[in-house]
Image (cartoon, rainbow, N blue to C red):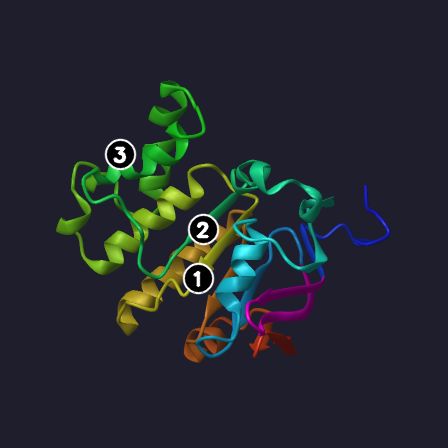
Amino acid sequence: MTNAFNPFGDILFVKDVIKLYPPNIVAVSHVSFSARKGEFLFLIGKSGAGKTTLFRLLSKQEEPDSGQIFLEDKDITKIPKSKGYLIRRKLGVVYQDFKLIQYKTVWENVAFALEVQGHSDKVVRQRVPQVLETVGLRNKHKIFPSMLSGGEQQRVAIARAIVNQPIILFADEPTGNLDWETSSEIMALFQQINQQGTTIIMATHNEDIVQKSQYRTLVIHKGKKSNEIHY
């Protein structure tokens, strides 16, 4: 069922969102866009353009000063911040710097995302090997992050982000710390995950990746959506 604000039933609908920081910093200014279920969408812009702030708003890590954000037709801006974790349970996030737990193995890093949500041991034993197979690391489940390459660490981070079967996967500059060849491999993995039905919204400043992939692209400049590119 759709509503007046989201007439097409997009999985994500952002309406006139503004985010300010004191004393007078406008991080996000009147941004509106939508994403369809199963879409792969790029957000591009220079460092400081507002991409990361926008991701934090979409994942309810921060609250907008005004505007609305609909996730599966529910206005999450009306949900108390104290209940934000319920929204984040539906989402996956991959960061540039991996954010892995160094004292946990590959298996334990991925399993942790399920354990904190109270999933049973049976679910953990079922899902963890599946996602490690997807990212090509099933044979390295006992390895610690420090023993892995940058590309392998990012694969662990991706596995952790998708093990909860998120409705949207946010990727914030996921290839920023990787060389060109590894970046291409990671992009191929994201495309594989997208082809399996997961909606992906990726922030990047790598124009080569954007032009090669040719997905719909939103250009963010000084907190505003300055352009939208359709290939």
Residue 74 is inside the magenta segment = no
110 with respect to 194 (left or right): left
Question: Which amino acid lies under the numbered mark 2 shown in the image of this protein?
Answer: Val
Q: Give the range drawn in magenta.
A: 16-34
Q: Which residue position holds label 1?
A: 172
Residue at position x 56%, y 62% from top? 54
Which mark is drawn over residue 93?
2
Q: Please identify the residue farthest to the left as the structure is shown.
A: 147
Q: Position of residue 78 (x, y in %)?
A: 71, 44
Is 72 displayed left or right of 157 in the figure? right
User: Which quadrant of the rendered structure holds the N terminus?
Assistant: top right
Kindly identify the amino acid type of the residue bearing the numbered disc 1.
Asp
Q: Quadrant of the C terminus?
A: bottom right
In the picture, residue 36 is in which quadrant? bottom right
Instruction: Provide the major secondary structure of the magenta segment.
Output: strand
Q: In this view, does 200 lie above or below 72?
A: below
Whether residue 187 is situated above or below residue 205 in the rendered picture: above
Q: How crowded is mark 2: few (under 14 residues within 10 Å), some or many (20 or more)?
A: many
Q: What element carries label 1?
A: strand
Q: In which quarter of the image is residue 112?
A: top left
Is there a contact, CB below 8 Å, between mark 2 and mark 1? yes
Spatial separation of the CA atoms under disc 3 and disc 1: 23 Å
